[in-house]
Amino acid sequence: MEKYLMGIDIGTSSTKGLLLTTTGKIIKQAKSSYPINTPHAGWAEGNAMDWLEAVTTVIHQLAQVIDPDQLIGIGLDGLYGGSGVPVDEANQILGPALIWMDRRATQQVQEVYNRVDQTELMKTTGNLADPYYGYLKMMWIKEHQPELYAQTARFLPPESYVIKEFTGLESINYSAAGNLAGIFNINSDQWDPALASQLGIDLSKLPTKLVASTEVAGTVLPEWAERLGVNAGTSIFNTGVDVGPATVGTGIFGPGSVTIAIGTSMNAALVTEQPLLDRNLIIWPYAYEPRKNYYNFAGANTAGAIVAWFTQEFATENSARLDELSQAVPVGSNGVTVLPFFMGERSPLWDSTVRGTILGISLRTTEIDLYNAFQEAIAFSVRQSIEQFGDQVGDAITVVGGVSNSTKMLHLIADVTGKTVKTTQSGGEADLGSAMLAGVGAQVLKPATAQRWAQIDETVAPDKEKHYLYDRYYQKYRDAYRTVKPYYEKFSELD
């Protein structure tokens, strides 16, 4: 009898899931969407009830096509939930999660450096202070919403919240703990009581059980089994922050090549045996063998999101048609430069005040010029990110995620970076990676077998002439940011 695995990815704007056999054949996929709440400029909140309902819907849809006895296990990952979901002792939601995109905790950065030496913070946690990190968001809640902080029994990452609902058991993946940063010691792979005390964060408000992605986090409770359409006792694996499983989905189970995941945001990642400290990167334990491997990444808060925003708000054609029409736009978009910092920026810039900016518009600027400039901005951001890895970047990079479906974007990234760009047939999706990790954890799948599932689908070599031209436009892009940075800093209080 055929056996199956499920992978579920709680994303920023939708939950996606897939059902596949233990031999890698995808049987069914499902998706459920929800909004992001942005009540103020630079704020971004997630509703945990949206996540729970979406995961329930997706699992139920996937489970309908199989006998529940055939399901081996479910791997469940989630967007970086920042502060986490504030819940009481009964796991009841007390407020929204301040997700990764939220930049409100700017004042807390200086508070951190007033209390903790910057060098010691980097040495202990692998990360510095920035509103991106969950520990600063928790400090913001404690200062600005003291009643909520006091009432909160736990701050749970999105996947941890949902898994606790389904299983009754509480856990946090090593990757989610490491990405909380500030109070997680990457040397001991545990919470750091000394740092937590210095920063005024109560460790009792965080899960005490840290789990690897291949370790069973719990089993489905009888009261949830019928709603999900699975058997009570079905194993669930907490696979952590989504970009980790997404990288596993490209076949990377250890130190390897650079992987660029581009969806709503962009993450450029390199798995290493030693953390790449002092490079303005985000660092946490990798999704596979977290005590041996480190996930080092830079990226953009808004990548695919800015193209989707422009297309929805201003374009008269759909994105496929715009891709076709913009092929004729020359390098540099006829003088238009876009800075893609629509929600501030994280690694490697770490700038909370900067905003999206369009420079060089004239009376001859067209819709197609603007669209092309938005796409160039994503490619420039990719180049800026991978430069942080130094000489560890080879001649090729793997690009996955929704943007990889655009052949034009693959060529743009190749031309801007000067690297050969590879894409995979089925890899690079977090739900696939989570299913792989569940299979490895359930001992029905070997990493070497899973690696073969992610076969290279397309290889795009850079155009040398265009790369030469893009070197100059990339410098223009970098200089544009340096020029506008003080402007946004000066007037940030007017937002």
Image (cartoon, rainbow, N blue to C red):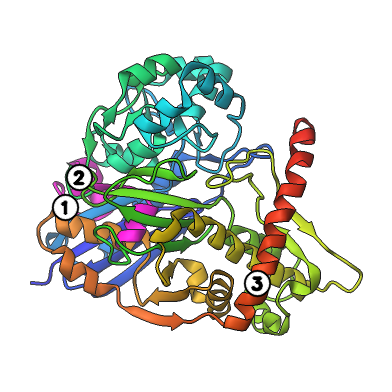
Q: Kindly state the secondary structure of the residue where label 1 is placed.
A: loop
Residue 231: which disc?
A: 1
Q: Is residue 20 left or right of residue 47?
A: left
Q: Which stretch is magenta?
A: 220-248
Q: Earlier in the sequence, mark 2 or mark 1?
A: 2
Q: Are marks 2 and 1 in contact (CB under 8 Å)?
A: yes
Q: Earlier in the sequence, mark 2 or mark 3?
A: 2
Separation of residues labelled 2 and 1 (CA atoms): 7 Å
Determine the residue positioned at 58% across, 29% down.
105
- Please state the total of marks drawn on the protein image: 3
Label 2 or label 3, whichever lies nearer to me, is: 3
> Quick check: 121 above or below 396?
above
Residue 470: which disc?
A: 3
Between 188 and 13, the one nearer to me in the picture:
188
Q: Kindly state the secondary structure of the residue where label 3 is placed.
A: helix
Q: Residue 295 appears at what percent x and percent y? A: 35, 49
Residue 402: within the magenta?
no
Q: Is residue 63 left or right of residue 16?
A: left
- Residue that numbered label 2 is attached to: 220
Amino acid under disc 3: Tyr
Image quarter where the N terminus lies is bottom left
Determine the residue positioned at 65% across, 72% down.
470
Q: Residue 315 appears at what percent x and percent y? A: 74, 70
The answer to whether residue 161 is seen in the rendering is no
Q: Earlier in the sequence, mark 3 or mark 1?
A: 1
Separation of residues labelled 2 and 3 (CA atoms): 52 Å
Amino acid under disc 1: Asn
